[in-house]
Amino acid sequence: MNHQWQTAPSYPLSEDFLQLITTHVKNHKLTTEGKYLAQILWHRGIRDEKSVNEFLDSRYYQPSSPLDFGQEMKMAVKRLALAMEEGEKICIWGDFDADGVTSTAVLWEGLGQFFTPESQLTYYIPNRLRESHGLNRDGIKRLSQQGVTLIVTCDTGSTNLDEIAYATELGIDIIVTDHHTLPEKRPPLVAIINPRYFADNHPLYTLSGVAVAYKLVEAMYQCFPRLPRQPLTSLLDLVVIGLIADLVELKGDCRYLALEGMKILPHTKRVGVQKLLDLAKKNGDRPMDISFGIAPRINAVSRILGDASFCVKLLTTNDRKEAEILASQAEEANFNRKEVQKKVLDEAKKQVKDLDLSTTAVIVLSDNQWQTGVLGLVANALSQEYGRPSILFNTMNDNNDNLARGSARSVNGINLYDLVASQRHLLTHFGGHPFAAGMALPIENIELFREGINQKLKQQLDITNLEPIINIDLTVTVAELGKNLFRELYLIEPCGMGNPAPIYLVKNCCFKYTFSDNIKNKKDKKIKYLLTTYTLYDDSQRWGIKGKWWGHSSSEIDENQRYDVVVSLDCKYEENKHKKDKNPYTDYYEVTLIDLKLAENNTVNFTTQNKEKSIIKQQINSPVNIHTTQIKSNIYQEKWSKLMGVVKYAINHQKYIDKNKLKEKLLLTDKSLLVGLRALEYLGFDHEEYQQELKFSVNKSKYNELEYQRVIKQFIKITKDEYIQSLFTAKNC
């Protein structure tokens, strides 16, 4: 599927606006002028001094009071006060995704300042594989039998009208805290705290479930200020995890809470969160550390195991050993999730090939073997790739209720909730919001649902225009993809819905050292999820930038072609090996490939030899005597890296390599190449030679670390000697 690229225009900005941005950049002790930041803010409609200040610095923003929720919040606080007086037993009813789990953890710790945990305060999270989102009768009945008289929901419950009525029959009161679509009529409960009651321009409107739960706790802190033992702000690291993980727009109070939470997360005292960050090799100072680190591991637990209850304990425990055990379980679940997700995605794409996309407005697929836990992720991948809403159903009927259960994701601003709601007569239940939804329906209704929802969307828009769109923020060179650009645009974070992470276009570039492999789990076992690594080059500088392409093979890239590519930029951290350095991490920058197209001038000119000759000339013209010059290690170490890259490319593409061209390209002699090939053998790479052509293969039985270390030292010494000799030769010429 071809993606449509939309590049943001370059705006002529006023001096006053540029000076305002420069001031913010300098306040953060950056050395840049803010030209990239200014373009992005202007394009996103942040153009006056007040909005710029509030967006870039949370100190300028005045957050809303929890009492802005009006009577609903007052009734909730009043009911909780009564529960304190009467010593009632309360249950927090959460949800099994990251927003629901963090919401539960916030209420567990926050309400735990007013109620005794375990004896008076408990929590319940439905099992994803046996129960659906929201309240259910069986769970309510069990809580009633345990003596619970008040349920406080979080991230769920707004549309569970039948279940709320059932709880009332059993003598259980309900307080709903949620952010999903509202019911047509207010249900008969104590309070429903949901920002969807506000106008869509209200600063509280976009709050996620965890933020609504936080507002309830904040109201309790304001009404009973003498009771809490820990500060309210100690919950903000949990709040930001849920906010970033969920599909909500980061604006108004939502962005404010995220900014405040990101200040705490890198220094969190939560041992479980620390362990999740360690496993993800993140340090918590970026929202992507949540969206690609913490959140997938929390979400994977319910997707693979079903029961996500232990994730609340993982986020709130003070026991480091317990946290390590629970985090390891989440890590293992996440690796399994990737493999299951890849399998379902491959099978779903095969089904898409049988569709006529010119007449398909909504992709609706089903299979009786698909695991329900990954359907939302696969639906999201399909919607992004094919530019239309996607809905996947599991028809296994393992509950013997003849129901298919599905997940849906939207794209291109299409309101998914309204779209699914138009087919409610075919559904047993559904819920969600404009971007994502879950539902169930009788298996025999799937075809009617498919026809009905396609017809509905066709009535609303022209489906011939449903190409997936990639919105590009800036056009840059490889030389610009680095520290200065990253740190300047770090100021727009946290990124998410309504404020996406910057996307860059790099024109006329090429790939080198592409290599694909399946990623490994913590037991060093490969799983079926491809990752391609590479180095991206263009003509802006000699050194390229490393990158990744998730779920794709290196066979999709031709190193002999030039491309225009769309990438994101990330800062990576590695454990610092130098003990004298006070910083425990060293950072480097890499890109993630999003899309690529052949450039107009798509032939690569290999200039390695000319570049190295240029370096030699610089050495010759240097006034420093060659005998006292310290030879830079990257000259000969780069030869080894390039040789490794060629070998991996040859294996991946099953190609023969011309021996003479290889020597010419890497400036190697017969001697240095022979030693290099010997070092490769001890790394587990075999080669055969026929008529000056080399064929490489993997032979792990030959791997020998000691011999490799010995021979690689020979290779570096020989290439260093050859390099010095080339300097003398060039000097004498």
Image: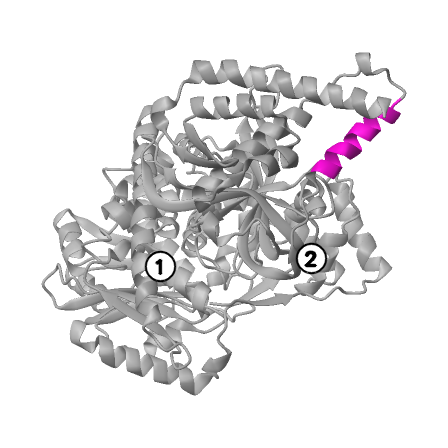
SS at circle 2:
strand
Numbered tag placed on residue 354 in the rendering: none
Q: Mark 1 is on which residue type? A: Val
Question: Horizontal and vertical percent for residue 647?
Answer: 50, 36
Marks 1/2: CA–CA distance:
30 Å
- Residue that numbered label 2 is attached to: 475
- Residue that numbered label 1 is attached to: 378
Which is the main secondary structure of the residues drawn in magenta?
helix
Location of residue 324 with respect to 54 vertically, above or below: above
Residue at screen point 84% across, 58% down: 16
Write down the quadrant of residue 452 in the picture: bottom left
How did the renderer colour the structure?
Answer: one colour
Magenta residues (range): 609-622
Question: Horizontal and vertical percent for residue 720?
Answer: 67, 19
Can the viewer see residue 231 in this picture?
A: no
Q: Quadrant of the C terminus?
A: top right
Q: Is residue 564 left or right of residue 210?
A: right
Q: Residues within 10 Å of mark 2 (few under 14, many from 20)?
A: some
Q: Earlier in the sequence, mark 1 or mark 2?
A: 1
Q: Residues within 10 Å of mark 1 (few under 14, many from 20)?
A: many
Write down the quadrant of residue 5 in the picture: bottom right
User: Which residue extends farthest right?
Assistant: 623
Q: Mark 2 is on which residue type? A: Thr
Question: Horizontal and vertical percent for residue 127?
Answer: 22, 51
SS at circle 1:
helix
User: Which residue extends farthest bottom?
Assistant: 459
Residue at screen point 58% across, 34% down: 642
